[in-house]
Amino acid sequence: MTCWKVVKSVLILYLILIPIFVWMIVWNGPVHYLPYYLPCPEIFSMKLQYAEEKTVQLFPELFYPQPRSLDQKRRDVLTLTPWLAPIVWEGTFNSELLDSAYKPLNLTIGVTAFAIGKYTMFVGRFVESAEKLFMKGYWVNYYIFTNNPQAIPRVQLQPGRSLSIVPIKKYSHWQEISMRRMEAINRHIAEVSHREVNYLFCLDIDMVFHNPWGVETLGEMVAAIHPGYYNVPRSQFPYERRSNSAAFIPDSQGDFYYAGAVFGGLVKQVYEFTRACHMTILADKANGIMAAWQEESHLNRHFFSHKPSKLLSPEYVWDDTKPRPPEMRLIRFSTVNKDYKEIRD
Amino acid sequence: MSLTIITVMKKVLILGGILMAGILGYFHLPHTNKLSWQPISIPYISQPSCQPIRQTDLNETFSVLPRMSYPQPFVDKPQRTDVLLVSPWLAPIVWEGTFNRDILNAQYRQKNFVVGVATFAVKKYVRFIEGFLGSANKFFLSGHRVNFYLFTDHPEKVPSINLAPEKRLFIIPVQNYSRWQDISMNRMDIISNHIHSHWRYEVDYLYSMDIDVQMFEHIGVEIIDTLVGTISSWQYTKPRDSNSYERHPESRAAIPHGEGDFYYAASFYGGSVSEVYKLTTACFKGVTEDRANGIEAKWHEESHLNKYLLYHKPTRLLSPEYYWDEELIRPRIIRVKRLSSVRKDLQEVRF
């Protein structure tokens, strides 16, 4: 009798357990939601007042060489994208002409840079070189986002230029810090910069200006071509290739690989862009996936769908460890040599 | 018997236990490729000050251009090396081979713009209406909404033409003048007035075109930009000092020697409604001031247009493909003739 009871109880146990296990196998797998990462979207739905981009208007008596229709200065590189956005290379533009058009507009240009943890050591050189070479003659506001305001050195600024320190939280992992930049920039635009600047550039801090960076870079939405991938077929671009990420781009698609270190444009466009990137970063977080190159992958996804109106050649975001090819006639902005292991964590 | 059953049961229990442990262990290992992706519903912490994320916001964020396959643009492989593609103020110059119309169409369609075309058919020029409208219906911004505003002094002579559903024709009676130069120059004033009175509510972009033209190839959304000028087919190779700018300093259209970028054709120009308003108002003011001083610029309103576009640089330039004069032999550089003037006897048709 007892052995039958044992048999019955075992059979009942298995009858209950086996369907449970079959269901667990057939089910698609766990989906994680991490609600404490998702912020209140009140910032996202704010309506802000912006100034529109102005057309180039000159004052008379400016002398410069005539542009000739059959005379292309740069025959070795692409100067126009298939959607008719200019690619800015040395030789394609005339700085005096552009300056004479933009200076009377009294523009203010903002620069955001993140100096978190040990990255505060790059601020000094960044700002010093920017003072000499970035948008000379224009009003410039530097916004340095940092968790350690005391570590930011005092740099002597030209008249008309200001530096404000924006305190932000430091996250534990460098990837998290990198990805949270989009949210921080977005919040800052909504709270502060949309009133103060017309154009905004978001640059990496661990870089230095070597040559002039002027108003040829101003546009509605501006992206820079990554120096490591500018002459490589699209299947080799380090896009996010997993299809369940929000930053996914398939092998057969893609125009350029844009660098996450430089992007910018009209304040309104940067606001919309950072908002969109942050939302896709959150979508990935909710699914427990982190894109291959963090926010750079999301930036590339967004620039693929919403093409930039102006592209900057790799002159504007160069990597000094690379040998300089003949196409790069003038390196304007490039990385500082550093030991990643030492500064990241 | 019961003993063997019990041992069998024990073995089954042990096997089952190992199986369950194995399955539990499998599910605890990280394996992200088994995760499913739910794109739309991102929950948010509800607080009284928050507004819910609107579905349209999410659609905008996640919306993509339709899937298109096109060759990769390579940075070290320019499309054309024989012509200038970007002006010194970084305005693109539109030549065949430099752009992909599918991408441009996909970007344009998201915005729901309406384009207006203003054209004048006065006196004998009414004979060109049919050719213009027939070819424009086929080749001008095909698939997109266009309003053709046809100004004429003989509305009854306008032939009836079957236009595509997105295209609309408005016939507007206008006064004619005895001199053809006056008819030509007063176009600026008429356009300016009409923008001010109602076109600014009806269209987003406005183009002014001559009526005595025909289109042979598609002219698409690559022409749409804030301020657009067409490089003249007669003068695109000339140095600035041999350009046909007005040189008499008394005229308001005068451009001194040593200045000038390109020579723009008045037969095809346009842009956003507000920019075209500024252009036509400024040009007509110049025309009026010249008339008061008893001067007429060498090429009438084209001279004033060139002066304006020298100091208010166009944001996009169209190559001579977009207005090719019939009398010229077409060189290989002009790969495509999209819009061309119609052969006519100027003496006969103007007077």
Image (cartoon, coloured by chain):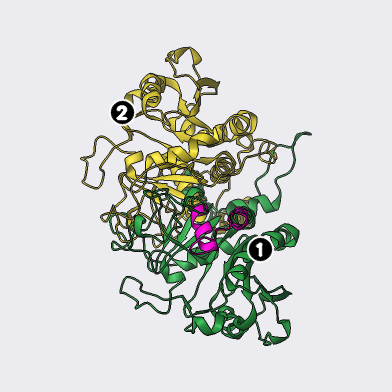
Chain colours: A yellow, B green
Q: Does the magenta stretch include residue B12?
A: no
For this rendering, which residue is in front, A342 or B336? B336
- In magenta, the rendered stretch is B282-309
| Coordinates of residue A9 in the picture (x, y in percent) | 64, 52
- Image quarter hosting the C terminus of chain A: top left
> Residue shown at 45%/16% (left/top)?
A152
Q: What residue type is labelled 1?
A: Ile
Q: Where is residue A220 in the image (x, y as percent from the top left)?
A: 52, 46
Residue identified by numbered label 2: A336
Q: Residue at x 75, y 34 (%)?
A: B47
Amino acid carrying label 2: it is Val
Main SS type for the magenta part?
Answer: helix
Residue depicted at x 45% and y 23%: A116
Q: Is residue A221 above or below residue B133?
A: above
At which x and y percent is residue B303? 50, 59
Q: Mark 2 lies on which chain?
A: A
Q: Nearer the viewer, residue A313 or B42?
A: A313
Q: Distance between the residues labelled 1 and 2?
A: 56 Å
Q: Mark 1 points at which residue?
A: B191
Residue A244 in sight: no
Callout 1: few (<14), some (14-19), or many (20+) C-alpha neighbours within 10 Å? many
Q: Chain ID for label 1?
A: B
Residue density around tag 2, few if under 14, some if 14–19, many if 20 or more, within 10 Å: some
